[in-house]
Amino acid sequence: MKNMLKQYGGKLLARFTNNWPAKVLSIALAIILFVFHRLSVLESRFFSTPLRIELGGNLAPASAYPQKIRVTLRGEADGIKPVLEDDIETYLDLKRYAGQGKGTYRVPVQYRKKGIALEVEPLEISMDPMEVTLELDQRVTKTLPVISQSQGYLEPGYELVSSTLTPSQAVVDGPEVLLNTLTGLNTEMIELGGRSDNFSLTLRIINPNPLLLLIRGEGNVEFQGIIGKTIRIRSFSNLPIELRGLKESLRADMSGAVGEIRLEGNQNELDPYEPQGSVLWVECSSIDAPGTYPLPVEADIPPLFTLIRAEPAQVILEVRQHTPDEDAHE
């Protein structure tokens, strides 16, 4: 029995090893054909996803990097078709460089499968580019003032009296080389055109560089603008000075005497104003006899305005007795 098994085994081995290179080649060819067939039934799909930066430790990107990564999915058509762009997340992991010094690094692009992509088999994922060269610098945090920007003009006769921003500061995280050059952050533009009343707006803080990260809050500030009427100052000169209340028995000569007033008021009211009639005058009702009298100069102005000053502030009035001869000449 043993001899029979031995003879049978020897014949089987001989048959198996007979022309074995051809048999090995056939098996390899069959495997290759299977793989090619497998590949022939797989389809490809392309899309781009945002490249995320995962910070951690003491370093932050200090040079530009691709904002999107081209992702290629390869698998069965029914499997890859439902995969959404959000189901593949691409990122650079900077936590691995924690504790290292600033410099140039070649950082591999990594991905995470989420959602539907977790359930798809087979699924081949490739990315372009596969790695990114980055300048990494010391990561710092800095508090900067927020500065509002405006354009346009208010209604004529109005001005922006005051304004406030809440919050008035923003906290920024990023590479030291960039933050050292920043002294403040601007808001988006405020349009002033046509405004005449107080107003409030929600404004977006403009990030001057995508390598910087605004933290604390949503990157917005509340703007409050207080609008008031524009105050203007105007001077009016060569205004005649008249006498009031001088007794009939007395005379004083003020012919040719002129003065000047300086007024303050709302621009829309003061600009068209022109003095009419006797604006400057001297009150003489207290004078009973001839003589020399220093008297203040008074001014009649509309209640809309404020008198800053009148010049001259006083006059020296020479008062004499009225004579009948003067009546004859008048």
Image (cartoon, rainbow, N blue to C red):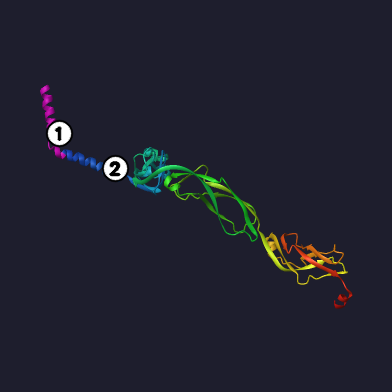
Magenta stretch, residue numbers:
1-22
The spot of residue 187 in percent (x, y) is 53, 51
Residue bearing the label numbered 2: 38
What amino acid is at disc 2? Arg
Q: Is residue 256 above or below residue 100?
A: below
| CB contact under 8 Å: marks 1 and 2 | no
Magenta stretch containing residue 10, yes or no? yes
Left/right of residue 8 with respect to residue 169 in the rendered view:
left
Quarter holding the N terminus is top left
Q: Which residue sits at x=17%, y=38%?
A: 24
Q: Which residue sits at x=79%, y=64%?
A: 282
Q: Which residue sits at x=11%, y=29%?
A: 10
Dominant secondary structure of the residues highlighted in magenta in the image: helix
Q: Nearer the viewer, mark 1 or mark 2?
A: 2
Cα gap from disc 1 to disc 2, whole angstroms: 29 Å
Quarter of the image for residue 26 reads top left
Q: Is residue 135 above or below residue 231?
A: above
The spot of residue 12 in percent (x, y) is 14, 31
Magenta stretch containing residue 236, yes or no? no
- Residue located farthest toward the bottom when viewing the structure as drawn: 329
Q: Which residue sits at x=26%, y=44%?
A: 36
Which disc is residue 153 wearing? none
Q: Is residue 264 above or below residue 83?
A: below
